[in-house]
Amino acid sequence: MDQVPDTAQHFIECDTESCRNFSEFYCNTCHQRICDQCKQRHQEQNNGHRIVLYHERKRKLPSEKCRIHATGDLDFFCDDCHNPICSTCVDQHHSDHEISDLETIYNDILQDCQKAITEVWRKDILEAKDNVELIGKKRENVKKEIVKLRVSMKYRADELKEVVDNILIDNIKKLDEIENSVLTEMMEQQKKKVDYINYLEKLIADYESKISLIKHTELIKFHLEISLATLKMPSKSEPKLPTFTLGTLNKEEIAKQFGEIELDLSERFKLSSVIKVSEKTIPREGIFHLSLLPPNKFWASEKWGNINQYDMEGNILQKISTTILDFQGNHTVTTEEELLYTDMNENAVNRVKSDMSTDKLIETGSWEPGAIFSSPINGHILVGLRKRTKSSNNKITRYNRERTKLQDIQWDDKRKTLYRSIRFITENINGDICTSDGKARKVVVVTASGTYRFSYTGHHSQSGFIPSGICTDVLGNILVCNNYFTFMKNCFSVDMLDINGQFLSFLLTSEQFPPSPHALCIDDQHNLWVGASDSFTILVYNYLQKTEK
C-alpha cells in the first residue's frame, strides 16, 4: 500500500558562511538555516529574530509585484478587503483597515494545504485505491455471475428445445402409425382390385374357349354371371390423409416460460397497505436493537445490556454480556455473518465469528464507541464515537475491511458539529449515512463522503420527536422510530421519509404496536421488524408489494 510521501531532505546544511554543519534550526525573520553552534551568535547579532526548529519554519514569501504600484512588493494582507497589498497601498488606501503580514498568511495557507494534502493521501487516495481493488474483485464476481446466467439461460433453452423435440418425436410417431394404417388399407384395396380383374379375365377366357361348342345351359349361366360381374366390383374409397395445423407462436408466452433477466430490484416494489405478518415472543424483556442473521436467526439487545441470539421461535441460542451506552444500536451483522459489537469499557469493537469465538477487531483509543453499522455495499464499518469532555464530542468513523481508518464525519461545511449523540446508524442504497441523534432530537443524513444533506425533526403534527431505531428499505425510504412520550400524550410511531428526506407517512402508529418502539430492521423478504423497549414481543409487518413487469 502506498504511503504518504516524505518531504524531508536527507541533509540540511547551515547557511552561515563557511559552516557546513547539520541545520536543526531556522530563522523565520531572515529565512536562514542555522545549526546549533551558530544559533547563539545569530541571536546576538540579530536582536529580535525568531528562531524555530527547522520543521516549524515559515517559507519565505515569494516575490510578487503590486498590480497598482509596479515597484512595490506584495508584503501585506488587508483583512477588510481580503487582498494582498504593498506598503504604498497601505499608506494610500488601507490606512484605517486591519493589516496582517502577508508572509504569515501565506505560511498559514501553505500549512493548511499541506495538512489537506496529507489527509488526501491518508484518507481519500488510500480509500480510492481500496475501492479500485474492491471494484476489481467485484468485476470478477460480476463476470462469474454473468457466466452463471448464460449457462442457466442455455440450460433453459436446451430444456425448451428438448420439450419441442419430444413433441416432434411424438407427432412423428403418431404420423408413422397413421401412414402404416392408411398404406395397409390401400394395399388391401389394391389386392381386391387385382383379384377382381383376375376373376373377370378368367370368366372371359372360359367363355371364349367354349364359344364354338357352348351349350345352352352354359350360355345362360355365363350370361347371368357376366351380367352380375359389376356387382362384385370392389368399392372405391380415397385414403384419409392426416393434416398438420400450425400452432400460434406467441413470443411473450414463450418468453414467460423461458424466463427473464432482471436488474433493478427497486423497480419491482411499491408501497402498499401495512399488514402484520407474524409475531415473535422472546423470554427477555426489552428489545433495544435488532440485527438479523439469515436465514433463520437474529440478535437482539435487551435492557440488561446483553446481546442474545435467537431462533425464529424465540429460543435463546447464545448470550453475550456487553456494556451498552444509552440503549444504542451497538451491534451489527456483517456480510460474512459475523456479529460486531461495541465495548465502551475497553473502547473497542469486538467480533463474534460463526464458531462463537470472539476477538478484538478495532481499538478506538480515547473515544468511546456506541452505535455501529456494517455496510452491505462495501463492507465498511461505521462506528459512532463519543469523547467525554465539557462539550461532549461526537463523530462517526469509517473503517475498511482491513480495519484501517478511512474517514471521520464530525463537522458540517461551517465547522459546526453534526451530532450531539449518535444512537443508531444505518446506510441508504445511495451510500448516504443516516443517524438517529437522540439529544438533538433529529435524524441527520450525510453523503458517503461526509457532506451534510438534510435533517428531519419530526412531522409538524407530532407533539415531539425523539428518534431511536432507524433503517432503510429497497426503495431508499428511511424508516425511523419516534420514541417521544409524555404523561399526557404519546407520539410513538414509525415515520417514513423518502431518500431526500421528504415525509411520506406514519407507516405505523401507537395503536399498531406495543409502547416505546425502539428497534427497527428489514429482513431479506423486505418485511419490517419492530421491537419495543417495554415488551417481550417483536412484530413483523409487510408494507411493500411486488409489481408486475
Image (cartoon, helix red, strand yellow):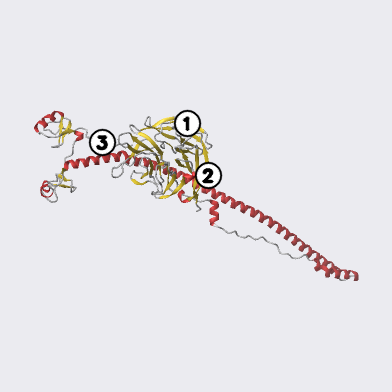
Q: Give, as a three-letter code, the residue at label 3.
A: Asp
| Percent position of residue 108, x then y | 21, 40
Residue 437: name its quadrant: top left
Are the residues flagged by discs 1 and 2 in contact, CB closer than 8 Å?
A: no
For the residue carrying disc 2, how many other residues have a C-alpha within 10 Å: few (<14), some (14-19), or many (20+)? few
Horizontally, residue 298 falls left or right of residue 230, namely left
**Mark toward the start of the polypeptide (2 vs 3):** 3
Residue at 55%, 52% in the rendered image: 257
| Percent position of residue 510, x then y | 47, 44
**Mark toward the start of the polypeptide (1 vs 2):** 2
Q: Secondary structure at mark 1?
A: strand
Are the residues flagged by discs 2 and 3 in contact, CB closer than 8 Å?
A: no
Separation of disc 2 and disc 3 at Cα?
Answer: 60 Å
Q: Is residue 273 above or below residue 226?
A: above
Q: Secondary structure at mark 3?
A: loop
Q: Give, as a three-letter code, the residue at label 1.
A: Lys
Q: Which dot marks residue 6?
A: 3
Q: Give, as a three-letter code, the residue at label 2.
A: Val
Horizontally, residue 400 falls left or right of residue 413, namely right
Which residue carries the number 2 mark? 277
Separation of disc 1 and disc 2 at Cα?
Answer: 27 Å
Mark in front: 2 vs 3:
2
Q: Secondary structure at mark 2?
A: strand
* Visible residue check, residue 136: no
Between residue 533 and residue 51, name the one nearer to us.
533
| Percent position of residue 11, x then y | 20, 32
Which residue carries the number 1 mark? 319
Between residue 495 and residue 246, name the one nearer to us.
495
Horizontally, residue 413 falls left or right of residue 12, namely right
